[in-house]
Image (cartoon, grey):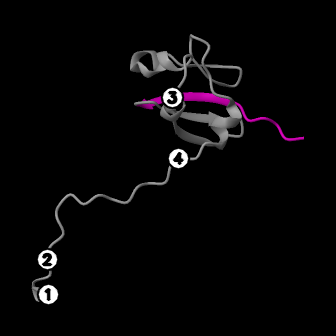
Amino acid sequence: MTLLPSVIRADYRGGYCIHVTFSDNSEKTIDFAPWLDGPVFEPLKAPNYFRRFFLDGGTVAWPNGADIAPETLYEYHAPENPPARRTQPARRNPARG
């Protein structure tokens, strides 16, 4: 029998990101922005309200009853890093003209 992971610690990291520690001591920073759709999540779009999260039932929750299942958080994978953007235009090769 596999035990369901639960969140045992959560720390705000800016924006809609929370760093969580699970009951198996694994950790990750999760961007909750993709989940902020629908009526129950609408209040969380306000940064001050989003920061009012707490732990309840082994997961991250908010005063209005919004939460994300702990197994969903456990399986979360951050999106792949986009390729680095150039901050300066590419230099032309003088030999190529």
Identity of the amino acid at label 2?
A: Arg
Horizontal and vertical percent for residue 70?
68, 31
Kindly report the distance in space between the C-alpha atoms of the residues bearing marks 4 and 3: 17 Å
Q: Residues within 10 Å of mark 2 (few under 14, many from 20)?
A: few
Q: Which residue corresponds to the image point at 54% horizontal and 31% vertical from the top-left?
A: 35
Disc 3 element? strand
Which callout, 4 or 2, points at the residue further toward the start of the chain? 4
Answer yes or no: do the residues labelled 3 and 2 have beta carbons within 8 Å? no
Which residue is denoted by mark 3 in the rendering? 11
Q: Disc 2 designates what residue?
A: 92
Q: Is residue 21 visible?
A: yes
For the residue labelled by badge 2, is the local secondary structure a helix, a strand or a loop? loop
> On the image, which quarter does residue 56 sit in?
top right
Residue 96, which numbered label?
1
Label 3 amino acid?
A: Asp
Q: Is residue 72 left or right of residue 64?
A: right
The verdict on residue 6 being magenta is: yes
Secondary structure category for the residue under label 4: loop
Q: Which mark is residue 78?
A: 4
Q: Residue at x 73, y 35 (%)?
A: 5
Element marked by disc 1? helix
- Specify the farthest residue to the bottom: 95
Residue 72 x/y as whole percent:
66, 36
Q: Are marks 1 and 2 in contact (CB under 8 Å)?
A: yes
Which one is earlier in the sequence, the residue at label 3 or at label 2?
A: 3
Q: Is residue 51 visible?
A: no
Disc 4 marks which amino acid? Answer: Ala
Mark 1–mark 3 Cα distance, whole angstroms, equals: 53 Å
How far apart marks 1 and 4 lie (CA) works out to 41 Å
